[in-house]
Image (cartoon, helix red, strand yellow):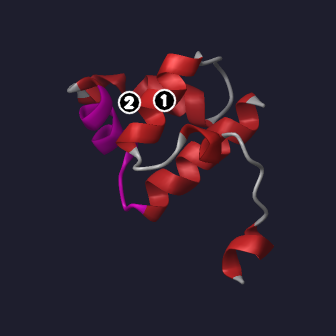
Amino acid sequence: MRETIGTNIRNRRMELGLTMADLARIMFDNRKRESYISLVENGQTVIDVERLAEFAEALSFQPTDLLVTVSYDEVSE
């Protein structure tokens, strides 16, 4: 599940044209938290429901959208 959430966060961030530093600034008002974004995107840390909601809000997504596995074939169609 961590990997799915991380992949979905990374894909959405990139879709929006944001860097990890950009997302860190949006979420934490601090680009130095970029390393935390990297840990989440790479599935190397667990996030709680509140943090999931914060990521979703920062990425203009619904929290449930970050939980679903999406194949690239589905996205390109």
The image shows residue 66, relative to residue 34, as above or below, that is: below
Q: Amino acid at mark 2?
A: Glu
Dominant secondary structure of the residues highlighted in magenta in the image: helix
Residue name at image x 25 percent, y 34 percent: 25
Q: Earlier in the sequence, mark 2 or mark 1?
A: 2
For residue 53, the mark is 1
Residue 69 drawn at (x, y percent): 78, 50
Mark 2 residue crowding within 10 angstroms, few (<14) / some (14–19) / many (20+): some
* Magenta stretch: includes residue 19: yes
- 69 to the left or right of 76: right
CB atoms at circles 2 and 1 under 8 Å apart? no
Frontmost residue, 37 versus 57: 57
**65 sits left or right of 33 in the view:** right
Q: Provide the residue span drawn in magenta.
A: 16-27
Name the disc covering residue 34, or none. 2
Q: Residue furthest bottom?
A: 77
User: Which of the image's four quarters has the C terminus?
Assistant: bottom right
Indicate left or right for 27 with 52 as reference: left
Q: Position of residue 57 (x, y in %)?
A: 39, 39
Nearer to us of marks 2 and 1 is: 1
Q: CA distance from mark 2 to mark 1?
A: 18 Å
Identify the amino acid type marked 1. Ala
Residue depicted at 79% across the width and 75% down the height: 73
